[in-house]
Amino acid sequence: MNGPVRRVLVCGARGFIGRHIVQALLQAGFTVRAGVRAGSTAPLPAGVEPCPMDFSRDTRPEPWHARVADCEAVINAVGVLREQAGQSMDAIHHAVPAALFSACANTGVRRVLQVSALMPPDSRTRYAQSKRQAEAALLALRAEGRLDACVLRPSVVFGEGGASTALFQRLARLPWLPWPAQAVSPRIQPIRVEDLAQACVRLLDAPGPLPATLDLVGPARYTLPDFIAALRQTHGGRPAQLLVLPAALGTASARMGDLCPRQPWGSETLALLGADNIADAAPLQALLGRAPRSVLEGAPA
């Protein structure tokens, strides 16, 4: 990038999306402070400064003041699809990010990117509600003129290491695809995680002001069965037979998934997949200066 190197705090730097954002920032010449779970010993890329934090407890701005000190920008890429013991979605998606945003406003860190999600406006899932509350907190500070902030709303994010990517790839290996009736028709517009990360770099480099929100979607729309079929064909598989499960059976399978919180399938996931998850790709294309890449290109095997 042109101009002096800037320091960016990336929260969730060891997560699926956060890892790719960190790598893109390093390649663009940024200095990165990596927000990581306190006590974590997982390695970070060379030159990245670790910054311990607790996204389940740090619900006041004060602990965040030192963490954002000397940073010119903050990116929050923390998110969970499933709650686990000691990990409340309200805390992780709303209360803690709101404290982080207030700390940025208090200390003069103006540029903040919040990685949210493209969600149906009427979704009543805990995931959607908690994400929307964080968006509202950030956009309120923006409206007051205290932050130059942008909420990023990606559709399904696809790439190596993603939990949903792994689920779709497992399903693509099946000769029969059992799929809940309520999730057969809704469409997704999956985006490559690399394009999401590059969008973050472009937004930090932008002269401003940033757009308040930005939908991030790939170039193609699919129903979920069609997307899984396309993945299967990408790796040379013959088309799988679609087995549409009655809605009640699909709901039962999701409730069974609720009993296994370390995998992505559950009632919240089924509810999110039961509505269209699509948007206009033109804003992302304008930001990147090129069309977003197909997720089928070089898809993980």
Image: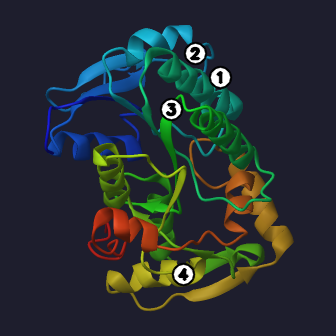
In this figure, which residue is indicated by the disc labeled 4? 222
Kind of residue at disc 2:
Asp
Give the label, 3 or 4, closer to the camera.
3
Kind of residue at disc 4:
Tyr
For disc 2, the neighbor class at 10 Å (few under 14, some 14 to 19, many from 20) is some
For disc 1, the neighbor class at 10 Å (few under 14, some 14 to 19, many from 20) is few
- Disc on the earlier residue, 2 or 3: 2
| Label 4 close to label 1 by CB (< 8 Å) | no
Q: Position of residue 255 (x, y in %)?
A: 77, 53
In this figure, which residue is indicated by the disc labeled 1? 86
In this figure, which residue is indicated by the disc labeled 2? 58
Q: Quadrant of residue 109?
A: top left
In this figure, which residue is indicated by the disc labeled 3? 147
Q: Quadrant of residue 187?
A: bottom right
The answer to whether any part of residue 220 appears in the image is: yes
* Residue 31 to residue 276: above or below: above
Give the label, 2 or 4, closer to the camera.
2
Q: Residue furthest right?
A: 248
For disc 4, the neighbor class at 10 Å (few under 14, some 14 to 19, many from 20) is some
* Residue 65 to residue 55: above or below: above
Tell me: 185 left or right of 29.
Answer: right
